[in-house]
Image (tube, rainbow, N blue to C red):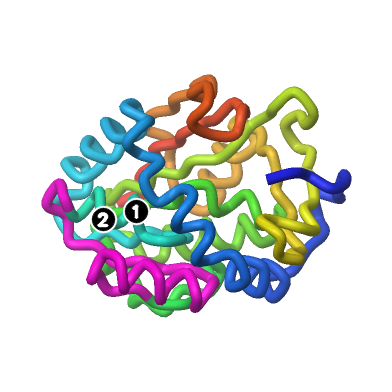
Amino acid sequence: MTAASAASPDAGTSTATRHSYNAVAERYAAEIGDELDGKPLDRALLAAFVELASEGPIADIGCGPGHATAHLAHHGARTLGVDLSPAMCAVAHRTTALPCAAADMTALPIRSHTMGGILCWYAVIHLNQTERAAAYAEFARVLCPGAPALIAFHTDDTDTGPGQATHLTEWWDHPVDLTFRYLDPTTEVAALARAGLTLAARLDRAPHPGVEHASQRSYLLVRRLA
């Protein structure tokens, strides 16, 4: 992907994000559907997360083509994919045979206190600060008391620092309207805490050369307060 221009951290809408991912869903799946093969640390984190969320089903929020959802299921988890894009959900269900629902993470169609875990893998990067706060509140609402959430996001790259964003207008020859935010882990830990999700662990890592976008990444493991 190529960032077309700088963007305000508070710009963008869910409608634009949905339409953009609908447009690239098939190509996205073809390009990154096997990305976990080259990411041993991510695979280990997902396997550990299944153990931590052993008391109930895991919702993969922003599941995209479902490759992480399937990896969780491979390790024995009961999983549900949720994505803003109906086209992504269709790809995920077709390729994994796992249940997948099209929904906005700021208003999840999930009953309160029913999830044993939430995975949110590079999806909150499309939300502004207010929207992320709403999503974190939803995560807390649907999680069982004490249940974990694992949230991953980009923090910076050579062109963009924490708290900044880039905007994409074309992706794989499709017109899109996507804002990618680079987040400050300390700021997100505080926002999660305000939603009732307390930090259990944090991992920062450098990119895998030739496997993924060359950005620094952060993984936050949080738990819903009992």
196 vs 76, nearest the viewer: 76
Q: Residue at the location (52% across, 53% down)?
A: 195
Is residue 118 within the magenta segment?
Answer: no
Q: Residue at the location (46% across, 77% down)?
A: 102
Secondary structure under the numbered disc 2 in the rendered image: helix
Residue 155 position in % (x across, y down): 64, 32
Say the numbered circle drawn on residue 55: none
* Contact, mark 1 vs mark 2 (Cβ under 8 Å): yes
Is residue 77 within the magenta segment?
Answer: yes
Q: Is disc 2 surrounded by few (<14), some (14 to 19) or many (20+) residues within 10 Å?
A: many
Secondary structure under the numbered disc 1 in the rendered image: helix
Q: Name the side, left or right, on which 89 lies relative to 177.
A: left
What quarter of the picture does the N terminus occupy?
top right
Q: Mark 1 points at which residue?
A: 67
Q: Name the residue under label 2.
A: 70
Residue 157 position in % (x across, y down): 70, 27
127 vs 189, nearest the viewer: 127
Q: Give the image quarter of residue 187.
A: top right
The span shown in magenta is 74-100
- Amino acid type, residue under disc 1 in the picture: His
Residue 35 position in % (x across, y down): 40, 41
Q: How far apart are marks 1 and 2 (CA)?
A: 5 Å
Q: Name the side, left or right, on which 43 lies relative to 132.
A: left
Looking at the picture, does residue 83 appear above or below residue 36?
Answer: below
- Amino acid type, residue under disc 2 in the picture: Ala
Q: Residue at the location (26% across, 65% down)?
A: 96
